[in-house]
Image (cartoon, rainbow, N blue to C red):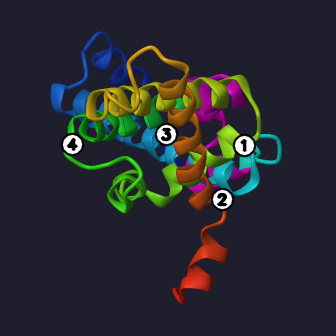
Amino acid sequence: MRFSIDTSSMRRAGAGRSRPKWRVATTARVYAHALDRSVDAAMAQFAERGFTDATLRDIADAAGVSVGLVQHHFGTKDGLRQACDEAVLQILGPQMDVIEHADTEVDRPEFAAMLYSTSPVVVQYVIRLISEGTDAGASLFDWMSVGTERFLTDAHPDLFPPGTRRAHDAAAVLMVMHLGVGVLHEQLSRRLGFRA
């Protein structure tokens, strides 16, 4: 004998009821966490493989989410990269503010240490983004150079007067020098006797 249950009355009885607030809040937190994991995984994949070679499938797998979720929220790989860029600006913005107002010289190790302390993945992502020659990388490099230039002109106005080519050029060169450590970190670590 087969039993059948008529579920239509159960569906009708629940129709029109809103979900409990705790359930909505929990769902929103889970979704936000999945998006954060997606951005983190994308940043790591872009840093390791470059934008062209990273795939949405690999990013979704690394984040533990579906490709559909990534595409639904970010649209394309470029949309996901834009989310990564925004995350980098949120992370580095406060770091640049601290550096600009610190009593440290931008050419001392503390400057690079402060940048690299945020996250090795973020630093590698920034280096990859800038070195790939994209518009986003150029914008990020310019933003970092402007912050460094403000630091130089505030800390050493006699050497780097505001608005001068000297301050502009020195800031760009210092940014290249500090980012170069990230590019060549394995060689530098090996030469200094550290493991990369």
Q: Earlier in the sequence, mark 1 or mark 2?
A: 1
Query: Which residue is label 1 attached to?
Result: 131
Query: Which residue is label 3 attached to?
Result: 4
Q: Please identify, in this view, whether the residue under mark 3 or under mark 1 is nearer the observer.
A: 1
Q: What number of labels is visible?
A: 4
Q: Are marks 2 and 3 in contact (CB under 8 Å)?
A: no
Instruction: Tell me the quarter of the image containing the C terminus.
Output: bottom right
Q: What stretch is highlighted in magenta?
A: 58-83
Asked which secondary structure carries label 4, the reply is loop
Q: Which residue, as the protein is rendered here, is positioned at the far front?
A: 158
Let me know if residue 193 is in the magenta part: no
Q: Is residue 134 visible?
A: yes
* Spatial CA span between label 3 and label 1: 64 Å
Q: Which of marks 2 and 3 is nearer the N terminus?
A: 3
Image location of residue 130, percent across then percent down: 66, 38
| Type of amino acid at the residue the image marks with label 3 | Ser
Query: Which residue is label 2 attached to?
Result: 183
